[in-house]
Amino acid sequence: MDVLPRQAADAIVNMAADQMLLEHYPAPDRVRFRPFAWSEPSYTFGVSQSWAKYRALVPAEFPLVRRCTGGGLVSHLDDWTFALVIPPSHPLFKADAMATYAAVHEALLAALVGQGQPVKLAPLPEGQREFQAPDACAQRAEPNDLVRSDDGRKVAGAAQKRNKHGLLFQGSIEKSTVGPVDWDDFSARFVAALALALRVGAQATPWPDLNEDEVEGLIEQYSSPEWVEYR
């Protein structure tokens, strides 16, 4: 597993970088992991959701950018975020979405428990699951999301995109729902737990040389009204 350096960027560049990792990574058979930060407070929302609806909810001073993954509105005002790409050659690529959420969030669980945080996986519902719109996915826990074990508040969630290039998993931990965390130690624990869960080795890897035209094309896509506001 290639562990890329943690960098800060705005919402447009972060979302473009994640798609670059999925579709244009120079070592496409490698699992790759990218922890990242936000150079300014932002919100993102799922690829199939309504921009106008969320723009009315999000204060005008905050950028609002459409992701290529699913889900609803996510606040990046105070969170710890990461992207993981699983290539088609990896067995987990063929697993269903719930199995992928469970594998990654169990690693996340181990890392947070190692920091003394009271967390658990949100359980699968019994019987038929009632449909709920993803509008408040930052607050409402889905099965195999992480929640606090004492009061049930959501701690971490994620969204996915699967195509011929691999599976992109974008995850977010809401810092306000956990106690004091040494985030550097947490990151090391999470990488180790992920490598174990995915049965791969982990190695620190510099940011790769990417095709500048492809990078600029994706940045232009994520900043264009045709992408952000099309629904």
Image (cartoon, rainbow, N blue to C red):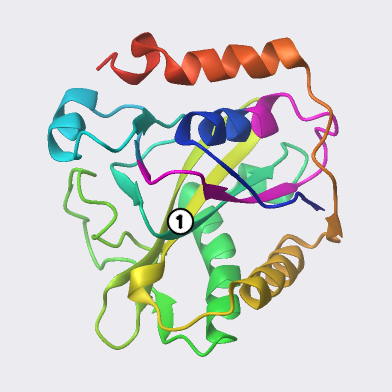
Q: Position of residue 208 (x, y in %)?
A: 83, 34
Q: Position of residue 180 (x, y in %)?
A: 46, 83
Q: Position of residue 100 (x, y in %)?
A: 55, 54
Say which element carries label 1: strand
Name the amino acid, label 1: Ser
Residue 32 shown left or right of residue 220 in the figure: right
The residue beneath circle 1 is 172
Q: Does residue 215 lie above or below 195 as drawn?
A: above
Q: Residue at x 52, y 13 (%)?
A: 220
Residue 227 colored in magenta in the image: no
Q: Does residue 84 lie above or below 126 as drawn?
A: above
**Is residue 190 at least partly visible in the picture?**
yes
Q: Quadrant of residue 56?
A: top left
Q: Residue at x 84, y 56 (%)?
A: 204
- Per the rendered image, the range of residues in magenta is 20-42
Closest to the observer: 162 or 168? 168
Residue 34 colored in magenta in the image: yes
Residue 31 shown left or right of residue 61 in the figure: right
Residue 125 shown left or right of residue 109 in the figure: left
Q: Residue at x 24, y 25 (%)?
A: 51
Residue 203 shown left or right of residue 143 in the figure: right
Q: Does residue 230 lie above or below 76 as drawn?
A: above
Q: Position of residue 130 (x, y in %)?
A: 16, 53
Q: Residues within 10 Å of mark 1 (few under 14, many from 20)?
A: many
**Is residue 165 at least partly visible in the picture?**
no
Q: Residue at x 36, y 9 (%)?
A: 226
Q: What number of labels is visible?
A: 1
Q: Quadrant of residue 218?
A: top right
Quadrant into which the C terminus falls = top left
